Image (spheres, coloured by chain):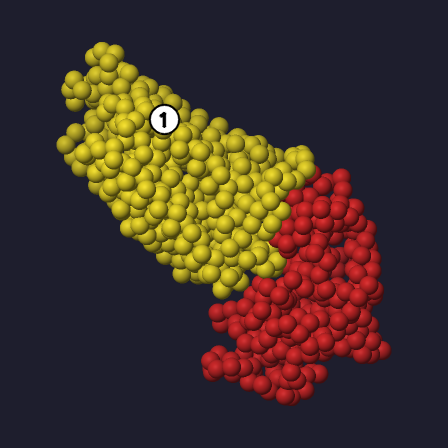
Chain colours: A red, B yellow
Amino acid sequence: MLRVGGARYVGGMTAQAGPPPSGTSDLASQSAPTPPPDPAAALSLRGLWKRFGQKIAVHGISLDVPAGSFYGLVGPNGAGKTTTLSMATGLLRPDYGSVHVSGTDLWAQPDQAKRQLGVLPDGARLFDRLTGTQLITYAGLLRGLDRDTVASRTQDLLRALDLTKDANTFVVDYSAGMTKKIALASAMIHAPGTLVLDEPFEAVDPVSAANIREILADYVRSGGTVVVSSHVMDLVQRMCDHVAVVAAGQVLAAGTVDDVRGDQSLEDRFVDMVGGRATGEGLEWLRTSSASS
Amino acid sequence: MVAHLVRLKLTLLGNTFRRSVWQTIGLIAACLYGLGVVGMLVAAVIATGSYDTEVLGLVVTLGGALATLGWWLIPLFLFGVDATLDPHRFATFGIPLRTLVTGLGVAALISVPGIATLLTGLGVTLAWWRTPALLPLALLGVALGVATCVLGSRALTTALAPLLEARRSREVLAILAMVLLVMIGPMMSWLGGSFGGGGPRSLEGVARTSPEGIRLLADQLAGVVAWTPLGAAWSLPATAHDGAWLAFVGHLAVALGTVALLWLVWERALGRALVRPPVGGGRGAKAKGLGWFGRFPATPTGAVAARSTTYWLRDPRYGSVLAIVPLMPVILWFSGRETDNQLLLILAPIVAWVLGFGLSNDVAYDHTAFALHVATGTSGSADRWGRVIPILCFGVPLVSLFAVLSAVVAGHTALLPAVLGLSLGTLALGLGVSSAVSARLVYPVPKPGESPFKQPQGAAVASMVSQTIALLIVAVLSLPALALSVLAFAQDSPPLAWVALVVSLAVGVGVLVGGVRIGARTYDRRAPELLQQVQSFA
């Protein structure tokens, strides 16, 4: 049902090159017309659109991430999570729509807004010819911190993320999980008000993941805001207090985790909403008993 | 199975046409270029064959041997250039080894160089049209020769893969190859020069005495090469034409033995590669402390400069540029000896130009790591100056040193200001133009960790266009300095040399400051677009 709606918008968009229709109202929890950006929210997205060639990756996403929340962005592969987060952090210019970081218009005043954000992009390389210490230091200095602050915070971060013994190893020789952790440290060095982390737990071992979860939970308790994208529903349900479900470039549901999932588990609710779950029939030959054929 | 692999390779080749406009243009250009070379070669050889079959034999044997050598050695340095059918990817399928070897071998032929070699070989057989009876033998020679090329290249790369997969050894090898490549010219001229004085029996002496001499030399060379794995297959028709049947049997045995041996080596190596997947370089080199980050000021600009310096010293993609710098005086000294080292005078300006131009695509070298600059909101001026400062720091002393040395060696101490001015001016100018251009035009370069030789598909055209634009700007802006310097030399006038110094420096510094400012403004406006462009290279 929802997918049909999405498909209709693809057609409408390619036919008319003008601004997006404001009628995203019939979709899920968004009510028309879109309210103005919320200056109290840590992140306030309004009507974000992005098209790559013929494919519309994000069809008018509006979201409010309340200050001090632990916000999960979930969705199937190719839902537009990374594109949305890139636009929300100043890495990708949206075709339409606005992003406000605690009331500052990100795309109008990028310098001021970016100062309040710590970003872990997914799939971006790192300056991996630097050692772990050097990479964190680099991020800190680029943020304009002074040398002493950078040095002490670097040591703290390395210790918290259990990277002290690899501090002098070149990042290019790190494992995937260690690379994620060092990127996370680079995102946190300037103590931003809001952390936006795209797939922070991918390839991270369970012990490190627990470590990171604890660090992030502490950070939220002390007043920070964290946005993570993931497709591990179980993790999001346990960790986050708010969640938004994104599919085909649109928000299907957003709110507190309990509101969104109702009396189901988040995973079941998600599968219901996104649809397209195959029943596993038609693979009878996969059973070992019929292997002889 | 063989048909499957061939079809897979064809599909992959076809898909590159659909990736992007630049890639398509690049691939078409490569195809046209290959076809043109093949056509010219075949036409030339057929023309030769029409008037002298003996020369034809020499050309085919030596040319074939050279092509084989190329097939064997180039992939070692260009490692990864054709990883579309990487054997590791078939590790999980459990394909019988023999089938896999056959399939990969045939599939390896389906590439621009493979098809070009095959077409050239087949075309060249036509050159034996005067003695049609040789045609089957010539075809046999081509089949064996092409097999030697393909099997040899695969056998060598697969057998040496464990060595090549270690990042460090690959980097050292790549820079070594670069140095050798650059040195070929001067070495040849040096060899020629020293032999030239050595009497009539030396290479160049023979060449000078008569065309017969060259012929004799080629004859001897071909005689030797025909017995080696490199030339045996290619020499078959010529040997048969000469009627030397005993030698023919010998050459055939060498050729067949080579193919069999290479096949065996490849099969063995492949078998080993399939059960031992590549492991990431686990040795983990270390560097203590902050390195350059401790030496540059603790500001965003200083941080970018420290990072840039680290990369110039640690990343082989930059290293290949740096490796050329100490070689340049050697090359110019060798080539300029006959003109009293006057050629040495262009040393400093050229090194300055190479260094200044080295920045013209710097963001593409960062690849998506550039996201850090965008995410942290690094300002344009910090980004631009940070990249310029390291080159100024080591470029100014280096270029000055080169300028002084070259002026002294060439005996123009009085005109030193002109050389110095032109060199430093060119450095500043190049950096300024690079800073402005690289914020707008980026083109694909080898990704971090890849061989510096690997040119990404489709990069040729895009890089040519943007490089040409930058070059034109540099050329126009350096006209006044260049004209004054040349005039100072033409008139042998020290005062004019001083004028040249002042003008060159003024223009250079002006362009540097202006270029960085323009670049910074462009960067501030479109850093996210720049990132997206770099991302699209992936």
Q: Residue at position x 59%, y 47% from top?
A: B303
- The answer to which of B431 and A160 lies nearer the viewer is B431
- The answer to which of A27 and A118 lies nearer the viewer is A118
Question: Horizontal and vertical percent for residue A44?
Answer: 67, 75
Q: Quick one: SS at disc 1? A: helix
Residue A93 seen anywhere in this rendered image of the structure: yes
Farthest front residue?
A: B495
Q: Amino acid at mark 1?
A: Leu
In the image, residue A158 sits, relative to residue B519, either above or below, namely above
Quarter of image, res B404: top left
Residue that mark 1 sits on: B405
Q: Quadrant of the N terminus of chain A?
A: bottom right
- The answer to which of B32 and B301 lies nearer the viewer is B301
Q: Residue at position x 79%, y 75% from top?
A: A256
In the image, residue B469 sits, relative to residue B164, either above or below, namely below
Q: Residue at position x 75%, y 71% from top?
A: A67
In the image, residue B238 sits, relative to residue B7, either above or below, namely above
Farthest right residue?
A: A263
- Check disc 1: other Cα within 10 Å, few if <14, some if 14-19, many if 20+: some
Q: Residue at position x 76%, y 77% from top?
A: A255
- Please give the chain letter of the residue carrying mark 1: B
Residue B279 seen anywhere in this rendered image of the structure: no
Q: Is residue A65 left or right of residue B364?
A: right
Q: Quadrant of the C terminus of chain A?
A: bottom right
Question: Horizontal and vertical percent for residue B405?
Answer: 36, 26
In the image, residue B386 sits, relative to residue A289, either above or below, namely above
Total tally of numbered discs in the picture: 1
Question: Horizontal and vertical percent for residue B242?
Answer: 23, 23
